[in-house]
Structure formats: C-alpha cells, structure tokens
Image (spheres, rainbow, N blue to C red):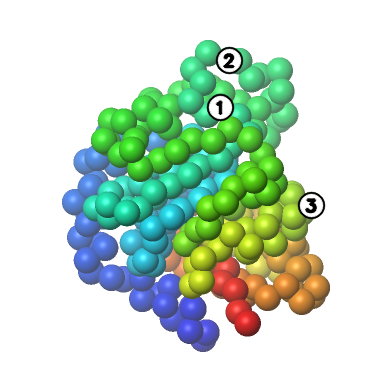
Amino acid sequence: MSQLSELLKSIWTLEDIDKDWESIKELRESMELPEFTGGVNPGDQRAIYYLARGFELNNILEIGTHLGCSTTHLALAIKDNPNAKITTVDIRDVNDTETDHSEHYIPHDFRGKNFSQFKSKYTPKECLEVLDLDDKVEFVMGDSVNFFTNTKETYDLIFLDGNHDFDVVIGEVPLAMEKLNQGGIILLHDYFPDCKPLWPKSSDVVCTGPFMAIKYLQRSYTKIHVEPCGELPWEVKYEGEHATSLAVGVLYE
C-alpha cells in the first residue's frame, strides 16, 4: 500500500471530520441538492468534503461547476478557514436562471442543460448565499485551457471535473500541474482504473477518458502519481456500493 493510499484511508475515518460532517447535516439537507444529474453523487460529495478537510488547503480551483454540488461541499469544508477561497470554472453561466440551453443539449450529455432543468432548488451562487459562504467562492465562465493559460494564481487543490474526454483531460492535467503549489493535489472524477466498471450493479457505466489520459501522460514521463480513492466507509452511487470514481494525483520529482 502506498503512502498516499494510507493517508487517504486515514482521512475517511478521522473522528473530528466525522463529527463536523454530522453537525452540518441540516444545512446540507436544506440545500436539496439534486442527485444523478451528471455531477458528483452524495457519497462523493462527502468524500470531497473529507479531502478538503484532511489536506491543508487555502486556494482551491474547481473545473466544472455544473450545479454546484461539489462547490458547496468544498465551501462547507473551508468555512472556518479565513484564508481559504475557491475559484470554480464552467463553460456556461451556471447561475443564469433565464437562458434555455436545450438547443445545445446532447442526449446523455449534461453540458447543454440549464440548472433549472434539473429542478434544483437554488443556483450554485444562491446556495452559497443561503449558507453565508458566497464570499468564499468566485465563479468564472470560460473553458479550462484559457483559464489555466491566463491565471497567475497557484492552487493547493485542483479538481478536474469538467469535460472527461481523453483529448481534453490530456491537455488539462499538464496545465494543472503547472499551477499546483508544492504539496498540492489534483483531484479527478470519473477515474475508472483499467477502464473497468466500479459497480457490479451497473457494469455498463465506465468513463475511459481520465484513466487513459493519465496513463498516456505517465508513459510520456509526466511526473504524476494517481491513487484511486477506492472503497469508502459510506455508500456512493448505488445502494450497497462503496467504490468511488474519485482519484488523487500528486507530483513527484
């Protein structure tokens, strides 16, 4: 077992984080965040909260805001850290309540849908306002490559959860590595080791882009080690299933 794997396992069982997670239960439930909408599932939302608490993070970047489920849990995790902040980037204005994106909608592809089409109670910004955490988060509309190219910021955590196509991920990861602070982590979603299903009950659910992109980059001598988060102590996408598609990437010399 690698040192990173051991660290991740210890984070999932930290009693202080467990207690804080339970203490914000009513806040979390009051948001009525929609499930199975192409974003992170409730089990992964919890894992993201634990990771943000378990690592020392001051500057967080999220690529792929979508409905703001992960954004909200990252904000909850850093709420007591006065120095911590989040920048979240999406190709759409995720807080737009008017525009109908249905003409751009591709079946089984959630990128063309307006948040209201998911019957979400709040926009991502409204959700943070209700939680009194809106001062922690900056929303940016644009594509990830342009953002990475133009930003002068560096980050402790970069969460890549936008477009999972191979040719997109293979371009994003090296750019993210350049913007990562020493000791920082890259968090990947929909990472399926060896492109195999994670959940026996849904063996047709496999996203190949992130895993194949990482393997290609590693063969090209890109100095990144990726550790799948594996089995969590709580359920994730399906009843009785504990395997998450989250994975943590770290740089090495």
In percent of width and height, residue 59 lies at 43, 55
Q: Which of marks 1 and 2 is in front?
A: 1
Q: Name the amino acid, label 3.
A: Asp
Tell me which label, 3 or 1, sits earlier in the chain. Answer: 1
Q: In which quarter of the image is the C terminus?
A: bottom right
Q: Nearer the viewer, mark 3 or mark 1?
A: 1
Q: Name the residue under label 3.
A: 167
Tell me which label, 2 or 3, sits earlier in the chain. Answer: 2
Which residue is located at x 66 percent, y 68 percent?
Answer: 193
Looking at the picture, does residue 187 appear above or below residue 230?
above
Which residue is located at x 42 percent, y 77 percent?
Answer: 7
Where is residue 147, by image quadrant? top right
Q: Mark 2 points at which residue?
A: 99
> Does residue 53 appear left or right of residue 69 in this picture?
left
Q: Which disc is residue 93 wearing? A: 1
For the question of whether residue 204 can be seen, the reply is no
Tell me which label, 1 or 2, sits earlier in the chain. Answer: 1
Mark 3: secondary structure: helix
